[in-house]
Structures are given as C-alpha cells and as structure tokens.
Amino acid sequence: MEEMELIEAYVEGKLAGESLISFEAQLQSDAVLRNEVAQFRVLISGINLAGERKFSQKVREWEKAATLLDQATQQSQASPLPQSAETTTSAAAKSDQTPEPGRTASLTWLYAAVPTAVMVILLAIWVYPHLFPPSMEELYTQNFVPYPDLYTSMGDGPDARQAAIAFYNEQNYEQAAESFTHILQTQSKDYQLYMYVGISYLESGLKAEALQTFDHIIANAPNNYREPAQWYKALTYLKYKQLGESRDMLQIILAQESHAYQARAQRLLKKLRKL
C-alpha cells in the first residue's frame, strides 16, 4: 500500500492489526509523517465542509423566492384595489413557506462562505508549499528528531552515561558531547555512544566533528546504527546548506532495500528537488 493510501486509511479508521501497530509506531518516531497526517485531517475536514454547497444553493433559492414575494407585496400595497380573501390567504400561505428575507440573507452569506473557506484550506495545504517551498533551514527543522534516549528506557544504573544522557535530554549538547566523548575513551566500541556524540556535535554547530563521527559509525557499526547515521549525515549537510551532498546521501539511503529511513529520505529528497 502506498504511503498516501496508508495515511488515508489511518485517518479514516480503516487500518487494523499489524498494519495499524506498525503505522502508529512510525508516527511516534517520524515528525514529518505526523505533520502529513495532520494536514490530511485538515483536508478531509475541508472536503466535508464542501458538502454544504448544496445547502448554500438551497438558501439562495429561498432568498430569490423572498425577493419575489417582497416585490409582489409592494405592488399590492401600491394598488388601490382591495385584496380578496383568497389572495390574502394565498399570500399568507406563501409567506409561511418562505424564510424571512433578512435572516435568509445572513444565512446565505454564511453558507456561501463555506466553499471559499474550503478553497483557502486547500490552497494553504497544497498550493502554497509548491509556490513557496520551505528553505533548507525549515526542512532541517521539520526533519530533525534527536536520536532517542535508549539508556533511560533500558533502566541503566546511575553511571557516567546517565549524567551524559541527562545533558543530552536537556538539549545541553555541548556538555553532552564532552561527557560522551570522555566515556568513549574507555568504551570505544559502543556505537550507541557514538550516535549521541554525533547528534551532540551536530546540534552544537560542530559540522566537521559531526560528519566525522557519522562516517565512523557508517564504516564500522552494524545496520541498526549505520542506517540512522546515514540519515543524520544527510541532515548535517542540509543544516549547513550543502544541498548536493544532502541529496547524494539521501540517494544512497534510497538505494538500500528495506532501509529504516527510506520513507523519510524519499519525502525529503522530493522536497529538496524543488530547491
């Protein structure tokens, strides 16, 4: 099932079982996907509002009938001839079936505005991003999610790693980088530590150190660390406006079957091609 079909099925409550569990797990870690799901919800709401067009047309018909009735009433009042009982009864009956003109006009304005509102929503979601694509800085912000804190979730004891991860979670990346680097002096094969060091360098503005760290992971670590390192390396290039290098790294990710970051890389590369 294509990604857009998955999003549609999820929003409409049609996903179930393993498909639902897998999609919700991806939502937890993929900020871009969460944003696309939110946009799709707004789009569906807009389409539902568009169904009010038929009601809007009905209100306009009422307004037209009210105008004709008002004209007939004015002509009748201007005529010196008395109205028969039958005419009076007919006019009263017609008046009972037709909404009050003033109220009808206000209702017409309200419901006529619904299609316009829908169009504004659609333009904001789909047209505006095509005419004014986000900058590299905005794309970086949209796609960067720090590598998760696995130490706390695993319940490791109070050691140097816990102190370092506390700095990391507080986004005190300079102190985190220093603390993690100190630990690596005695635990040089812990590639999870390297991931935290690379992210800390990236967010501290140390581009060369971040790239060097991610390259070390890519060259030496198993896939569960190599794949996120490739993704963060692409983001490092993006943050420092090296568009060509970022695209190349994303292409490398896409060339690997079943890469954990393949869907994210595909979405980001599609947006980078517009820059």
Image: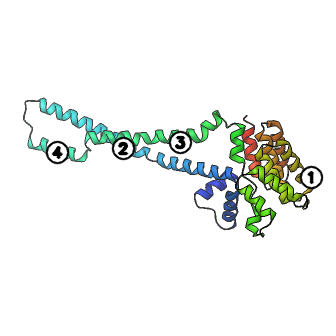
| Distance from the alpha carbon under mark 4 to that under mark 2 | 22 Å
Q: Quadrant of residue 259?
A: bottom right
Q: Is residue 216 left or right of residue 207?
A: right
Q: Are marks 1 and 2 in contact (CB under 8 Å)?
A: no
Check disc 1 and report its element: helix, strand or loop.
helix
Which amino acid, by three-letter code, is at mark 3?
Ile
**Residue nearest the viewer, comparing 183 with 15:** 183
Residue labelled with disc 4: 92
Of the numbered discs 1 and 4, the one sitting upstream in the chain is 4
Which is nearer the eye, 107 or 215?
Answer: 215
Image position of 235 (left or right of 24): right
Q: Is residue 225 visible?
A: no
Alpha carbons under labels 2 and 3: distance apart:
24 Å
User: Where residue 28 appears, x then y in whole percent?
Assistant: 68, 59
Which residue position is annotated with label 3?
A: 121
Q: Callout 4, which amino acid? A: Ala
Residue 219's disc is: 1
Residue that appears at 73% across and 59% down: 166
Residues at marks 1 and 2, CA–CA distance in whole angstroms: 68 Å
* First reached walking from the N terminus: tag 1 or tag 2: 2
Mark nearer the viewer, 1 or 4: 1
